[in-house]
Amino acid sequence: MVVEGEKAADAARKIIGDSYVVVTWPNGAKAVDSSDWSPIKGRRVLIWPDADAPGIEAGKEIATINNALLGEKPGENVSAELFLALVDQGLKVFTAIYKRIY
């Protein structure tokens, strides 16, 4: 799971435990391209950006980088069923994080 910021990474680790490896990158949403993303090569990655415009753009950029690292084209390699399952899984994680914070 890729999240934006150390606080989000710490919170996600506490909530989801060992279900995912949680990582972030240094220097915020505008610094996605200055990070080494090779460790996620060949892995299924759940990207959970901040819910603001810079965060969403950062998430899209990471998705593009991950797709490029995997040699895949966005939108052409994921079945509708898998996509829906991943969205459902993401909503469960978000709900758990939200309940813990609020």
Image (cartoon, rainbow, N blue to C red):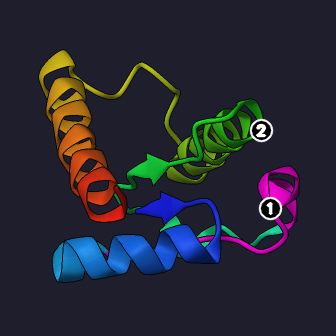
Please, what is the three-letter code of the amino acid marked with disc 2?
Pro
Position above or below: 21 against 33: below
Q: Residues within 10 Å of mark 1 (few under 14, many from 20)?
A: some
**Residue 32 at x, y percent in the picture:** 78, 56
Q: Nearer the viewer, residue 99 or 13?
A: 99
Left or right: where 39 falls relative to 82? right
Q: Which quadrant is the N terminus positioned in?
A: bottom left
Left or right: where 1 falls relative to 100? right
Farthest residue to the front: give it.
Answer: 102
Left or right: where 88 falls relative to 20? left
Pointer 2 residue:
54
Indicate the quadrant where residue 76 lies.
top left
Q: SS of the residue at dot 1?
A: loop
Indicate the quadrant where residue 17 lies.
bottom left
Judge whether residue 93 is colored magenta. Answer: no
Q: Are marks 2 and 1 in contact (CB under 8 Å)?
A: yes
Viewer can see residue 83: yes
Q: SS of the residue at dot 2?
A: helix
Q: Nearer the viewer, residue 16 or 44?
A: 16
Judge whether residue 24 is colored magenta. Answer: yes
Position above or below: 44 against 89: below
Viewer can see residue 41: no
Position above or below: 44 against 34: above
CA–CA distance between discs 2 and 1?
9 Å
**Residue 73 at x, y percent in the picture:** 52, 28
**Residue 10 at x, y percent in the picture:** 46, 81
Pointer 1 residue:
28
Residue numbers of the magenta segment: 21-34
